[in-house]
Image (spheres, grey):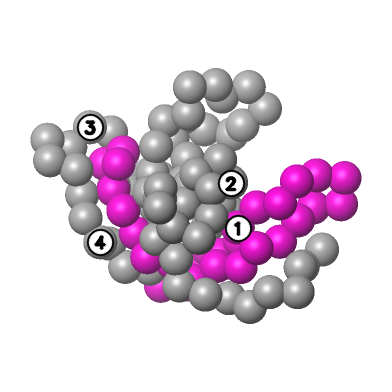
Amino acid sequence: MALPSDYEWIEVESFRPAQTSGLHGKVHVRPVAGGPYPTTLHVECSKSLSRNYPVGTRFRIRAKLTDREGGGQYLYSSWQWAFEVISTPTGGGR
């Protein structure tokens, strides 16, 4: 169910969560620290962000806050939408 919010450009980064129980995959995407959303919020977006770039890469995506019935809030961005690579970590590290 969509919450009453609009899509906006936000900065996110790929990371390896300490716990992966209940999650799909080893690399995930989260909002960056200091932004309008907590880093604990999950981000649903194109898998290419977590598969094709080193862990720690920062991106700018268009997303909106939403929620699942019986679940928590998360940020949603269509897998089809363009994104911008802001920075990649020095030394790589997939």
Of the two numbered discs 1 and 4 on the same chain, state the one appearing first in sequence. 1
One can see residue 18 in this view:
yes
Residue 23 pos. (x, y %): 61, 31
Residue for badge 3: 93
Which residue is rendered at x = 58% and y = 46% of the image? 41
Q: Are marks 3 and 1 in contact (CB under 8 Å)?
A: no
* Mark 4–mark 3 distance (CA, rounded to whole Å): 17 Å
* Three-letter amino acid code at the position of disc 1: Leu
Residue for badge 4: 86
Which residue is rendered at x = 40% and y = 48% of the image? 33
Q: Which residues are magenta?
A: 54-82
* Three-letter amino acid code at the position of disc 4: Ile
* Mark 3–mark 2 distance (CA, rounded to whole Å): 23 Å
* Three-letter amino acid code at the position of disc 2: Leu
Q: In the image, which disc is placed on residue 36?
A: none
Q: Nearer the viewer, mark 3 or mark 1?
A: 1
Q: Nearer the viewer, mark 2 or mark 4?
A: 2
| Residue 38 covered by magenta stretch | no
**Location of the N terminus (image quadrant):** bottom right
Q: Residue furthest right?
A: 70
Of the two numbered discs 1 and 2 on the same chain, state the one appearing first in sequence. 2
**Location of the C terminus (image quadrant):** top left
Q: In the image, which disc is placed on residue 75?
A: 1
* Mark 1–mark 4 distance (CA, rounded to whole Å): 19 Å
**Secondary element at tag 1:** strand
Of the two numbered discs 2 and 4 on the same chain, state the one appearing first in sequence. 2
Residue for badge 2: 41
